[in-house]
Image (cartoon, rainbow, N blue to C red):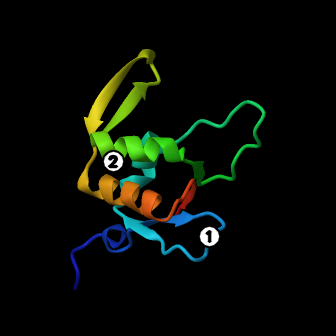
Amino acid sequence: MSTHHPSHRHPVYAHAVGRPDVPPCGMPARFRTDIAYFLTPTDAGEAKLPLGEYKIDPANVQEWLDTGVLSLVSPLDATHATEVEISEDQERFVHWLRDHLVDRVRVE
């Protein structure tokens, strides 16, 4: 009998929206919250994306790879950002974004 929690066996997958040619990127379960660090806010005039889909600015992807850090803005204090080193899993995700030129992601 396995002692592992079922969610540990089934990682989360990032899929390139509208790109069936791109293999999904498997991520740990915590990526469901980590994805927020990579999002590009939608503009006021843009249609809202479906639940679970996210827009990512390709210009940011190269910056994350060059610096190895994410700049996190607190929802409580938008004037101050904190820089956090990218984890190995997050770095793999960013490489996946760059290698496949992905700018829209669905997480499931």
| Residue under the point 38% across and 40% down | 63
| Residue under the point 62% across and 63% down | 17
- Residue 42 shown left or right of residue 4 in the figure: right
Image coords of residue 56 (percent x, y):
54, 47
- Residue 19 circle label: 1
| Residue under the point 27% across and 35% down | 84
Q: Nearer the viewer, residue 28 or 41?
A: 41
Q: Nearer the viewer, residue 81 or 99?
A: 99
- Residue 65 circle label: 2
Q: Amino acid at mark 2?
A: Leu
Label 1's element?
loop
- Residue 58 shown left or right of residue 7 in the figure: right
What separation in Å lies between label 1 and label 2 (alpha carbons)?
22 Å
Is the residue 75 above or below the residue 70 in the image? Answer: above
Image coords of residue 96 (percent x, y):
41, 62
Circle 2 residues within 10 Å: few <14, some 14–19, many ≥20: some
